[in-house]
Amino acid sequence: MPIFTFDEICVATGGRLFNYSGDSEGLSVRQTTSVSTDTRDIRAGALFVALKGERFDGHRFCQIAADKGAALLLVSDCSNLPSGLPYLLVSDTLLALGQIAKYYRIRLGCKVIGVTGSVGKTSTRRMIESVFGKSMKTHATKDNNNNEIGLPMTILSAPEDVELIILEMGMRLKGEISYLTHIAMPDVAVISNIGVAHIERLGSKEAILEAKLEICEGLINEKLLVINGEDSLLSQRLLKSGEKTWGELGVAFSAVNLLEDNPPIVSAANQVVKLMSARYFESGSEFLVRWFSENEEQEISFRLNVAGQHHVNNALLAILCALHFDVSVQAICEGLEEFSVLDGRGKLLKLGRYLIYDDAYNAGPESMAASFDSLKLLAPNSRRVAAVGGMLELGDYAKQYHFEAGIAAAKSGLSLIAVCGQHKDAFIEGVRTISTDIQVIMCEDKDEMVDVLAQKLQPEDALLIKASHAFGFHTLASELLNKINENQIKSEANK
């Protein structure tokens, strides 16, 4: 955590200081040694920021912060504050937190990469962190700390000698990424894709596109925008843009023929990474990439020790960022080989005699279709089974996208599908438009799905687990294995 003088905090926020008995020179001497928004982890000498939301008010905990040794309070309400403790009064403590984070980001003088996208932004951010880890001291977003509180706190937790910060930017509504990017001031902005997550709130993919492009508003220095060139909506929008908010454009292509089919976006790009070939297997993938800029061109071979085509797609974006900053090919290769997958985000598991493709952390139409395709690549010779839950926050488009997910499932060649969720009928209808041979079992909830799969799953099957986070499918694999073992014990006991 950074050390701030009282004077620096006043300058950053424009707040008014009260209960301070020293002179003006003392403002540049008195310090806070950390920043906290939660008294559960506050330390002596901290600046305590009393955030106020719809269901919480940090001002209620100012006395606790004082008792734990806070050096300064940042508040928007000065009633009932601890006596004798200096406090800084501002109109909005959340806004002030962002201002302090921006002040620190400027003080650090490091490079910043901002990452957003409808699908895969966390995996892309972690991939970028991995490829830079061998050559630069990096600091990055942890977990899902990608909102108006998490992003500033990520910056404020960076060490003073950091060289690169990788910041994930999430959003639910228009304007939120704009707010975050003006705090982060990224040198490079990465947009992994434009999907339909949050379409219930924003109304259309075009509105989601405009909201994601807000990330470019804060670009400084290099002003590089890195995109997935296969996202046609994004590519077309950039080509039509009359007012560019970026300086250079980097484009990644993973489809074999897409480079030749999209000469306009290629000609607009300053740097291109193109997937030339790839081999996928259970333990990972090997792939050949061609990279070319205005002055250079080369082909490079890479290896990932994680399974799934989408990981290769994310790697292309990370490779573009690394080559832009002149990271050595060897360092990129080593970083990619050490990349590992978080639980529930496309992790391949061998549980007993079953191959489990655990992609249960979240789901949307794009990631659902990608998971079906990945399972086919990873287990082409196995009987493939899917445990499918619903996709949330799709609003009026929910039935349509569940129907299309059913079509994608059927086209991927699944043998058995267990499905639950509010729109399971639309999903099954999509399956049946392609195939009447696939066995589809409708389940009431996850518990019934576990019971069904424990009876239906066969040794050597490959099982995909996929649903929105609220369905709780992150525990399905372990529950299923326990149920299979329990059934086996009962069966042997009855013999």
Image: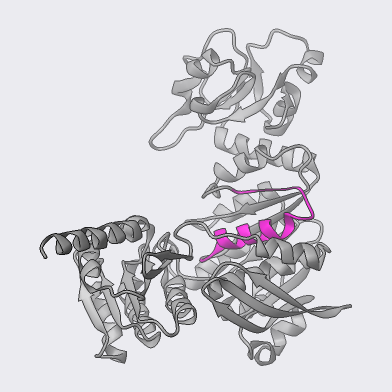
34, above or below 461, in the image? above
Give the farthest residue toward the left.
494
Residue in view at x 71 percent, y 86 percent: 264
The quadrant in which residue 424 appears is bottom left
Q: Nearer the viewer, residue 155 or 277?
A: 277
Q: Nearer the viewer, residue 177 or 473?
A: 473
Residue 42, can we see it? yes
Q: Nearer the viewer, residue 473 or 460?
A: 460
Q: Quadrant of the C terminus?
A: bottom left
Q: Is residue 476 magenta?
A: no
Residue in view at x 65 percent, y 69 percent: 315
Q: Which residues are magenta?
A: 119-141
Image coords of residue 459 (percent x, y): 32, 74
Image coords of residue 374 (percent x, y): 48, 77
Residue in view at x 66 percent, y 72 percent: 303
Residue 446, can we see it? no
Q: Is residue 128 magenta?
A: yes
